Image (spheres, grey):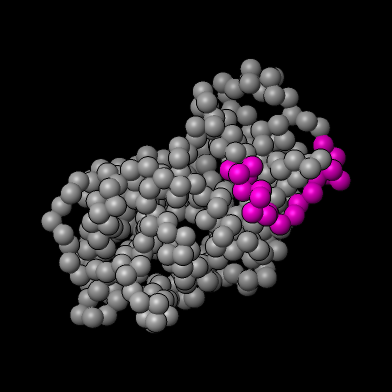
Amino acid sequence: MELWWPAGLKELREKHLAIPLTQSRVIVRPLEENDLAAAGRVARLAFGTFLGLSDPMQCMGDSEFAYARWKTDPSAAFAAEVAGELVGSVFVANWGSVGFFGPLTVHPNYWNQGIAQRLLERTMEVFDRWGTKHRGLYTFAHSPKHIALYQKFGFWPRYLTAIMSKEVAAQTPFKGWSRFSEAPEGDRTALLSACREVTGEIYLGLDLEREIRSVADLRLGDTVLLWENARLAGLAVCHTGAGTEAGSGRCYVKFGAVRPGPNAARNFESLVDSCEALATERGATRVVAGMNTARFEACCRMYARGYRTDLQGVVMAIPATAPGYNRPEVYLIDDWR
């Protein structure tokens, strides 16, 4: 994100004057593994400064996103460099026919100088290469500057997405689910195909294989598989613990969905039960899940279960008028941060 200086940070702004740039000095190139630490530092500084934290580097705690997102697809991550120094980065995610990018961050010293637009140009090239049908992002709903930036590239604000959480405690083990990590290697191709069938019924071409494999290969958590009469009814890709997108003591449901149909509401409850059971197994005391408010039925059920909003932003999408899978009857958890 190319961020703006909110009220209250004037003194900090004066202390860290933006460094004037000519665009010829900015190099946008593929992000490399040895860039990841710097990309993480810039992201924390950018978000923490924007949010007005007294110590911006404490933003996001001990959660980590750069390594996993880069390992998932190194060809879909880019760095902005000035005079040999990494000053920004962006990560692009491929969920089959659906794609989103984030975080897109720029060092505060270089805000408002066109670097985010340069990173966005490369992002749009990736979407074009993939043939992504539905493209989107998550951004700050209260920031006109963010909204205007992304509108330049055709994205349009849709519905709010609430980042919700709930404390969980040890509970009676819930049956009817399994873990992708427990499946023999020879069975995993069939399981991924079953997951693709479930998500494809929600939105044609939606495919979470990259996320499922990344979580398994990098040991970031696990993917919950919900069964109904020996048929896959739902799945949830979960990060758990420090060094993942969750952070210490947390289970982050990066994506969760159930098959549409007459049993969708009941199965959704069971899927969330399974995620909470996984959380307690892994020693997490809080479950975090994103919910787009356009998915009305699922959103209401999360509130009824005791989940409350910690943070909210807005999803922006292309095509501007297409809901994608953000429809009232869809039982799905995600956020595009």
* Left or right, residue 282 beside residue 6: left
* Left or right, residue 23 beside residue 89: right
Q: Position of residue 267 (x, y in %)?
A: 24, 67
Between 186 and 257, the one lying in front of the other is 186
Q: Where is residue 167 in the image (x, y as percent from the top left)?
A: 25, 43
Count the marks.
Answer: 0
Between 187 and 81, the one lying in front of the other is 187
**Residue drawn where x is 79% and y is 42% of the image:** 84
Q: Where is residue 82 in the image (x, y as percent from the top left)?
A: 78, 41
Magenta segment, which residues?
Answer: 21-40
Between 39 and 23, the one lying in front of the other is 39
Please indicate, yes or no, whether residue 166 appears anywhere in the rendered image.
no
Between 238 and 296, the one lying in front of the other is 238
Outermost residue on the left side: it is: 172
Q: Is residue 32 a member of the stretch shown in magenta?
A: yes
The quarter of the picture where the N terminus appears is top right
- Where, by quadrant of the figure, is residue 272 drawn? bottom left
**Residue drawn where x is 25% and y is 74% of the image:** 227
- Where, by quadrant of the figure, is residue 271 drawn? bottom left
Q: In the displayed structure, would residue 153 be above or below residue 99?
A: above
